[in-house]
Amino acid sequence: MQCKDISSMLSPYLDGVLNSDECAEVRVHLACCPKCKAELEELQAVMLLLQELPEMTPPVDFREKLLAKIDDIEVTKQKEQQKSWLTRVTAITRSTWYRSVAVAAVMMMTLGITSLWQQEDNSLLPVPTKEKQIINTAQQPNVPNPNPTSPNQAQTNNPEVVKNQEPNTSTASPLNENTNEPGKEAPAASNQTTIATPAKPITKDKQVESFIPKPSEGLVASSTTLKLDVDQVADVLKDINRIAQNNGAVINTPYSGTNESGTLEIRVTKSSYGTIIHSLQGLGAVVSFLPVEKDLSIQHKGAAERLAGLKQQQTELEQQYSEEPANLLAQQLEQVNHDMAEQVKVIKQIEERSNYSLITVTIM
Amino acid sequence: MPLEDQLLVERSKKGDREAFEHLVRLYENKVYTIAYRLMGNYADASDLAQDAFIKIYQALPNFRGDSSFSTWIYHITVNVCRDELRKRQRRPTVSLDDNSSENNNNTYEIRSNDPGPEEMLDRSETQAMIQSCLDTLSDDYREIIVMREIQELAYEEIAEILGCSLGTVKSRLSRARQALKEKISKKMELISQPKRLAK
C-alpha cells in the first residue's frame, strides 16, 4: 500500500473503526514509513488538543432569558388556543346557514305574534304613525292612564285624551330617536303644546344605543416584522403586490426606500396571515422574523365598562327627565349620549384592530 | 438513558417546569459549548443554544427515548447551528441588526470571525488558536469534527444525524482532521518563526 492510501486510513485507525485486516496493513506500513508515522503522531496530537478544549459556561442570565422565552411561548400558545375556540364559534355565527336560520326564526316569531294580535281584535297592534307623533309631542308625563293605547281615542285628536296617554309606553317617550322625521307633523304638534308640557327632544344615535361590545378575551393587535435579503428589490416588490392582491391584503404604507433596501407595511386579515407570511418568506433569505402580539383585552374591557357606566347614567337621567323635563337634565343627557358615542368609537377601533395583522416588510 | 434524565424527561413531558429547568441546568454547558465550537463566537453561541433548548422544549412530547436524551439534544443543537450556518452561506458577509439612525433605517452590524477582546481574554493562546483554525474550516468539516471530538459521537450516530453512509463519515472525518492539522501546523510555524529569528 502507498502512503496516500494509508494517510486516509489514519483517522479511522486512531478511532479504532478499521477492521482487523485494515488495521494490520496500517501497522505494517507505519513500521517501515517514518513519514506516515510522523503524520499519525501529528494527527493524534491535534485530536488530543481538540479533546482538551474546555467545556464552556453560558452567560449568567442564559437560563433566565431562556425560561422567559419559554414562558412567552406558553402564553402565546394559550392565546392561540383561546383564539381558535373563539374563531370556531365566530365562524359558525358568521356562516350563511346560521344567518339564514336566525332570519327564518325571527320571521317565524314575527308572523306568529302578528297573527295572535290579529286574532285578539288588534288590541295590541301599534298606534298608527300620525297618532304616534301627536302623542310624542303632546304627551303629559306622570298622569295615570285609565285606558292606554287605544287607537280610537288617539284618532279623536282630542288634547285631553292625548295627554292621558301612558307615559312609560314606547310611543310616549319624550326622547326622539334620530330615525324619526322631525317637522313632518309640526303644525299638528304645535296645536297640542298649549296643553301638554313641551319636552325638548334629545338626540340619540340608534347605532350607539344598539351597540354591544364583543367579549374582551383574546383581543390582540398582531404585528410582524419581516426582514428579507433579496436579489432584486424591484422584482420582489412586484411579487409582494401580487401576494397582497391574491390574498385580499392591503398595502397600508407604500414602499419607501431605494433600489437597494426599503420598507413597506401590509395589512392582512387574520385568516390570510399564515398564507401571506409563508409566501413572503419565500421571496428571499429571512434575516429576521419577529411576530408580536399586543394584548388589547384590558383596554377593551376598560372601555366596555365605561360604556356600561354611561349607559346606566343615561337610563337614570332619562327617568329623571321623563318626570321633570328640565333644561339642565337635557344638557346632561346630551353630554352622556355624546360620551357614549365616543366610547363606542373607541371600542369599535379596538375590535377592528384585532381583526387584522400588520406586516412590516424590510427588503434589502 | 440515566435514571435521573428519564425521570426529569417524563416529568417535563407532563408540563413540570422545574424538571425542565433541571434538565437545562444539566445540559446547558454542553449545548453551549457545541454551539460555540460550531459558530465561533459567544453571541451566536448563546442565541443558538437558547434556540436549541426552545426546540427541545417544544419537541419533548415527541421524544420516545429511542436514543439517549443527551444524543437527542446534541442532535437538535447541531441541526439548529447547521440551519443558521446554511442561512449565512446565502449571505456570507454580514448579519443584520435592527438599529436605526436618522439618515438610514437599516444599519448593519458586522460580525467578524476573528475573536473579539472578550474571547481573547477568556481563552488560552492555544485554545484560541485551535478555535480560530476551526472557524476557518468549511462548515461540513467543522461540524463533523465537533460531533466526533466535542460530542464524542460514534461513527454510526454521526452517519444517522448527517444522513450519510459510514464510509462517508470515515472519509469526511479523515479529510477534516487533515485539513485542521494543516491549518494548525501553519499557525505553529508562524508562531515559532519569530522565536527562531530572535535566537
Image (cartoon, coloured by chain):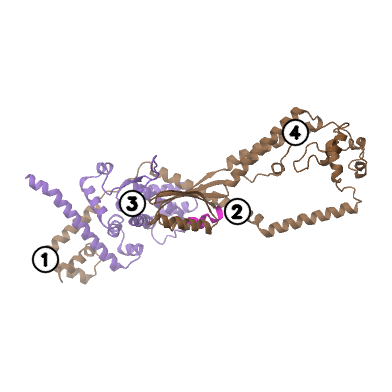
Chain colours: A brown, B purple
Q: CA distance from mark 4 to mark 1?
A: 107 Å
Closer to viewer: mark 4 or mark 3: 4
Q: Quadrant of residue A17?
A: bottom left
Q: Nearer the viewer, mark 2 or mark 4?
A: 4
Label 3 crowd bin: few (<14), some (14–19), many (20+), radius 10 Å: many
Q: Are marks 4 and 3 on the same chain?
A: no
Q: Which region of the structure is painted magenta?
A: A269-277
Looking at the rendered structure, whether the residues under marks 1 and 2 are on a common chain is answered as yes
In reply to whether residue A274 is colored magenta, the answer given is: yes
Query: Sequence order check: which comes first, mark 4 or mark 1?
Result: 1
Which residue in the protein does label 3 denote?
A: B35
- Answer with left or right where residue A168 lies relative to residue A261: right
Q: Looking at the picture, how far across and down is residue B148, in whole percent?
A: 28, 58
Residue hosting label 2: A87
| Chain to which mark 4 belongs | A
What x and y, as percent, mark residue A328? 74, 27
Residue wearing tag 4: A316
Chain holding disc 3: B
Circle 1 sits on which residue?
A33
What distance separates the C-alpha of mark 3 from that of mark 1? 39 Å
